[in-house]
Image (cartoon, rainbow, N blue to C red):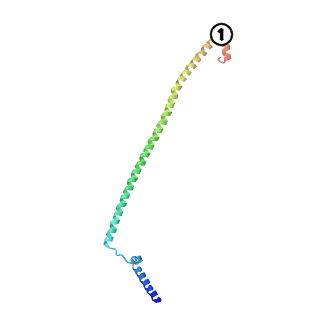
């Protein structure tokens, strides 16, 4: 009796394996799938949608590139304006310093000229006096004026 049970078990085992093989994914993948006209039309629609999407993406990238270039140009112009303003301020400060020095030095120059003229007048007067007075002449010689 034991042998009969083993034989039945063997048959059950073979039947289960055949059923699993029939319904296995390998069997399904092995079959040829027909390519229909509907599939072709669907593929064409997908291709056109992809092309339209690609065109839209390219247009978006072009518009972003244009706006980015415009922003860069605007920043460049702003930078030039700021550099021009800094240069103008520097020139203005230098001009103010030169004008202020000229304004501050001109009274000193005027006063110095007046003192030199007074000094020349005093020298003339002393030389005239030294012609008549020997004492003054000796003092002027000792001072190195004559």
- Drawn side of residue 92 relative to residue 53, left or right: right
Judging depth in this view, the residue of 76 and 42 nearest the camera is 42
Give the vertical position of 42 relative to 129 (above or below).
below
Residue 15, image x and y in percent? 41, 83
- Drawn side of residue 132 relative to residue 95, left or right: right
**Residue at horizontal 51%, vertical 30%?**
98
Q: Quadrant of the C terminus?
A: top right
Judging depth in this view, the residue of 25 and 102 nearest the camera is 25
Residue 102, image x and y in percent? 51, 27
Residue 55, image x and y in percent? 36, 59
Judging depth in this view, the residue of 101 and 67 nearest the camera is 67
Give the vertical position of 35 relative to 110 (above or below).
below
Residue 117 placement: quadrant: top right
Give the vertical position of 90 relative to 45 (above or below).
above
> Which residue, as the protein is rendered here, is positioned at the far top?
132
**Residue at horizontal 32%, vertical 66%?**
45
**Mark 1 crowdedness (10 Å alpha carbons): few <14, some 14-19, many ≥20:** few
Residue 9, image x and y in percent? 44, 85
SS for callout 1:
loop
**Residue at horizontal 48%, vertical 34%?**
92
- Drawn side of residue 61 relative to residue 135, left or right: left
Residue 128 placement: quadrant: top right
According to the picture, the residue beneath numbered tag 1 turns out to be 133
Q: How many marks?
A: 1
């Amino acid at each position: 009796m034991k042998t009969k049970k083993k034989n039945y078990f063997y048959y059950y085992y073979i039947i289960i394996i055949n059923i699993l093989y029939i319904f296995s994914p390998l069997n399904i993948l092995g079959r040829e799938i027909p390519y229909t006209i509907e599939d072709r039309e669907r593929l064409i629609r997908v291709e056109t949608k992809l092309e339209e999407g690609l065109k839209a993406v390219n247009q978006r990238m072009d518009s972003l590139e244009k706006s980015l270039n415009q922003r860069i140009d605007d920043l460049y112009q702003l930078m030039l304006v700021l550099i021009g303003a800094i240069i103008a301020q520097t020139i203005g400060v230098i001009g103010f310093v030169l004008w202020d020095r000229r304004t501050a030095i001109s009274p000193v120059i005027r006063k110095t000229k007046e003192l030199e003229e007074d000094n020349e007048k005093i020298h003339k007067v002393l030389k005239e006096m030294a012609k008549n007075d020997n004492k003054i002449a000796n003092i002027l010689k000792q001072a190195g004026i004559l």
